[in-house]
């Protein structure tokens, strides 16, 4: 089962990623843009996915859009206790690539 430490390690493994508080929860950013947050009250993270990727990956149980405006723009909840650990790296990379500067995507 994944833990917040696993999430943190996967996020910080992305090029030029860094951690910074977002209100009172950890957020992970590249070029000042958030690609992941870890919620403290629930075993979930928010990943900023491309809206098409979000639609393709949403299953209603483990991966689902955030309600409202943010969700329509790719903010996606992932219940990490339900997520197979081998999927984390791919999802984190997708979120990072969605907001990373083009120079880092090469």
Image (cartoon, helix red, strand yellow):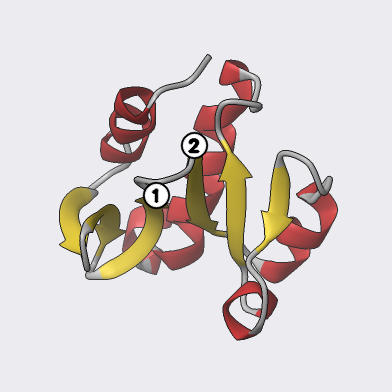
Tell me where residue 57 appears, x and y as whole percent: 78, 48
**Residue 81 position by quadrant:** top right
Tell me where residue 99 appears, x and y as whole percent: 43, 66
Could you tell me if the residues under marks 2 and 1 are in contact, i.e. CB atoms within 8 Å?
Answer: yes
Callout 2 environment at 10 Å: few (<14), some (14 to 19), or many (20+)?
A: some
Q: Is residue 76 above or below residue 39?
A: below
From the viewer's perspective, tell me whether residue 17 is left or right of residue 3: left
Secondary structure category for the residue under label 2: loop
Determine the residue positioned at 43% across, 53% down. Answer: 96
Determine the residue located farthest toward the top in the rendered image: 1
**Residue 64 position by quadrant:** bottom right
Secondary structure category for the residue under label 1: loop
Q: Give whichever of 34, 26 is nearer the camera.
A: 26
Determine the residue positioned at 57% across, 18% down. Answer: 85
Tell me where residue 8 appears, x and y as whole percent: 30, 34
Callout 1 environment at 10 Å: few (<14), some (14 to 19), or many (20+)?
A: some
Distance Cα–Cα, label 2 vs label 1: 7 Å
Q: Is residue 5 above or below residue 51?
A: above
The disc at residue 43 is 2
The disc at residue 39 is 1
């Amino acid at each position: 089962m994944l833990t917040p430490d696993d999430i943190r390690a996967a996020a910080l493994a992305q090029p030029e990623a860094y951690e910074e508080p977002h209100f009172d929860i950890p957020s992970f950013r590249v070029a000042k843009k958030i690609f992941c947050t870890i919620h403290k009250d629930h075993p979930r993270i928010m990943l900023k996915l491309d809206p098409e990727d979000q639609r393709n990956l949403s299953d209603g149980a483990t991966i689902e859009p955030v309600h409202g405006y943010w969700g329509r723009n790719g903010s996606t909840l992932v219940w990490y206790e339900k997520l197979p650990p081998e999927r984390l790296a791919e999802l984190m990379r997708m979120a990072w690539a969605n907001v990373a500067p083009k120079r880092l995507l090469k």
